Image (cartoon, rainbow, N blue to C red):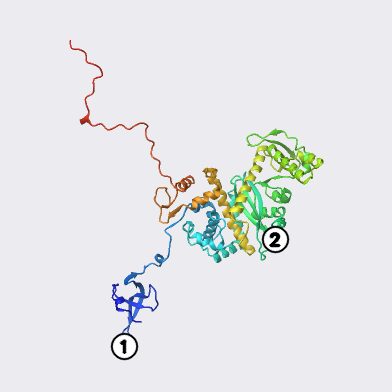
């Protein structure tokens, strides 16, 4: 098709030709470079046009950028605060993952784990979107986060159980010998019919759904998990207990477990692991309580915020019993028992006489000779993990899974483990900075997500470096408290009083004598 003369007359680079593609649009008239000419035997040379270098748009030549990447849309600013906080507490996790997994998979794992902390309810098909709007894409560049790539990643992680075990071993090596390990579990909804892990649990009558069981081991002193494992939903805690210890090869520490994890189930594991001990509560109807007179208390614990009486007694087998009674909890339990009996009209004097002395009582069994206060605080601190546990289950959206096969469920739970470690550390770091005194964890993460920063900014952020985008002063204060931004140097305090005026010798008058001069003579 012939190109109009007015289009060909538009100024453009030399050795170019205008080509009309015949389609309406801004790029109809393409400007091509003159290519080589091919000589045909017995004929005239035939010119061949080269690549497109621009277009004639609105009677003006508009060039095309030479670099293809320059033509791709790239943001000039990204959300910084929340992703930077997660990265600040996961350096050792990143190092341990690189010792076990392929670097490309590690980048994808850390990206997904970070995004699950920042946006708890994120779906698999939204990873790529939020990856490209936060500094996660700068921290872990090139991560494959399409829906299919994420599914394949979960499958690879779940299939290779030896690598997961090796990673957990690296985490356990960081546990100090005298630290206390708490083991607990939770049920997660999973109605998939194509994996063997999904089954009806003991709570299925209430929840009316299939579930999977996830066991975790926590370091109480660090307040963070050290390993995890997925079991079928119909597997009770007592049967999963020894398998969890063997599979993860837990060999040192003091296991602080609940009543669902009796030490009799791990007798062989304890015998094979001399540095592994336990501290477990026994049931209130256990005959050892009455046989050893554990309700005859012998002292009051000092240095705690409650009024707790205690008794310690060695028993056969080299074990010890520790009985504690919290007077405040005893009053609450007794009031609740009486209110329920009154409401249902089921009060029995005989049952009340038996239960009366047991209200607020907890009896612990251990294979170690501990100070009563130490034993009490070990188990009392374990309940702090319930708060973290509930936060992890809710904030990480662990009440359902998006996976179908067994291996995919295991792979997704491994990523959830990484997210949980990061969440626990963030809570501890923010708590030490005093930020959780006046706001919730969710509010803090929401504030930090609003801190956007230019992508060409310095590696070490400073509050006054001019690279922040519409960040509030309150958010700057939070960033500075968490060590994510260098604070503005404060000026030296001014001296008290008014600054004296400068004196000009030319305008100064002679001083008046202090007293009258003496008379002459």
- The residue under label 1 is 43
Q: Which mark is residue 199?
A: 2
- The quarter of the picture where the N terminus appears is bottom left
**Residue 226 vs residue 83, the one in the foreground:** 83
Element type at marker 1? loop
Q: Is residue 138 left or right of residue 507?
A: right
Mark found first going from the N terminus, 1 or 2: 1
Say above or below: 5 vs 423. below
The residue at the point 41 percent across, 44 percent down is 488
> Which quadrant of the figure has residue 401?
bottom right
Q: Position of residue 194 (x, y in %)?
A: 66, 66
246 is higher (above) or lower (below) than 320 = below
| C-alpha distance separating marks 1 and 2 | 81 Å
Q: Give the residue displayed 22% in from the left and 15% down from the top.
A: 517
Q: Residue at x 65, y 48 (%)?
A: 182
Q: Answer whether residue 74 is visible to the viewer in this image.
A: yes
Quarter holding the C terminus is top left
Q: Give the residue furthest to the bottom.
A: 42
| Residue 234: % across, % down | 71, 58
311 vs 304, left or right, is right
Q: Residue furthest top?
A: 521
Instruction: Give residue 154's position: percent from left, percent from top.
Output: 58, 62
> Is residue 320 in sight in this rendering?
no
Q: Residues within 10 Å of mark 1 (few under 14, many from 20)?
A: few
Q: Position of residue 500 (x, y in %)?
A: 30, 31
CA neighbours of label 2 inside 10 A, class few (<14), some (14 to 19), many (20+): many
Q: Left of 283 or right of it: where is 399?
A: left
Query: Residue 427 has which mark?
Result: none
Snapshot quadrant of residue 453: bottom left
- Observer-nearest residue: 1 or 490? 1
């Amino acid at each position: 098709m012939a190109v109009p003369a007015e289009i060909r007359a538009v100024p453009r680079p030399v050795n170019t030709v205008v080509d009309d593609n015949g389609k309406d649009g801004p790029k109809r008239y393409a400007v091509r470079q003159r290519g080589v000419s091919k000589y045909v035997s017995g004929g005239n040379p035939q010119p061949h046009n080269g690549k497109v270098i621009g277009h004639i748009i609105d009677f003006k030549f508009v060039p095309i950028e030479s670099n293809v990447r320059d033509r791709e849309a790239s943001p000039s600013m990204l959300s910084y605060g929340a992703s930077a906080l997660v990265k600040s507490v996961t350096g050792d996790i990143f190092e341990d993952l690189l010792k076990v997994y392929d670097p490309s998979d590690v980048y994808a794992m850390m990206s997904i784990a970070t995004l699950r902390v920042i946006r708890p309810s994120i779906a698999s098909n939204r990873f790529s979107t939020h990856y490209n709007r936060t500094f996660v894409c700068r921290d872990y560049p090139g991560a494959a986060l399409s829906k299919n790539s994420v599914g394949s990643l979960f499958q690879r992680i779940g299939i290779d159980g030896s690598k997961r075990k090796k990673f957990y071993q690296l985490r356990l090596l960081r546990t100090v010998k005298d630290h206390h390990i708490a083991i607990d579990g939770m049920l997660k909804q999973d109605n998939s019919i194509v994996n063997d892990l999904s089954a009806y649990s003991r709570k299925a009558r209430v929840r009316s759904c299939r579930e999977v069981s996830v066991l975790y081991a926590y370091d109480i002193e660090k307040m963070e998990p050290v390993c995890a494992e997925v079991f079928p939903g119909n597997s009770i805690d007592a049967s999963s207990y020894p398998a969890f210890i063997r599979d993860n090869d837990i060999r040192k520490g003091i296991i602080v477990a609940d009543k669902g994890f009796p030490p009799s189930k791990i007798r062989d594991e304890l015998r094979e692991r001399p540095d592994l001990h336990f501290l477990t509560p026994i049931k209130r109807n256990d005959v050892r309580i009455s046989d050893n007179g554990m309700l005859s208390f012998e002292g009051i614990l000092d240095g705690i915020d409650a009024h707790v009486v205690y008794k310690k007694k060695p028993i056969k087998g080299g074990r010890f019993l520790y009985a504690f009674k919290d007077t405040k909890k005893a009053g609450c339990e007794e009031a609740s028992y009486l209110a329920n009996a009154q409401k249902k009209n089921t009060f029995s004097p005989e049952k009340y006489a038996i239960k009366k002395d047991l209200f607020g009582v907890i009896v612990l069994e251990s294979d170690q000779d501990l100070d009563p206060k130490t034993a009490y605080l070990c188990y009392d601190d374990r309940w702090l993990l319930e708060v973290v546990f509930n936060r992890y289950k809710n904030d990480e959206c662990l009440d359902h899974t998006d996976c179908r096969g067994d291996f995919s469920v295991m792979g997704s739970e491994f990523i959830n483990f990484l997210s949980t470690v990061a969440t626990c550390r963030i809570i501890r770091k923010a708590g030490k900075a005093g930020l959780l005194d006046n706001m919730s964890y969710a509010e803090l993460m929401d504030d930090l997500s609003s801190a956007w920063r230019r992508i060409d900014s310095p590696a070490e952020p400073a509050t006054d470096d001019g690279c922040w985008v519409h960040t509030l002063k309150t958010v700057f204060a939070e960033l500075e408290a968490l060590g994510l931004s260098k604070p503005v140097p404060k000026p030296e305090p001014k001296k008290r009083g008014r600054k004296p005026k400068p004196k000009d010798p030319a305008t100064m008058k002679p001083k008046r004598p202090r007293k009258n001069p003496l008379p002459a003579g």
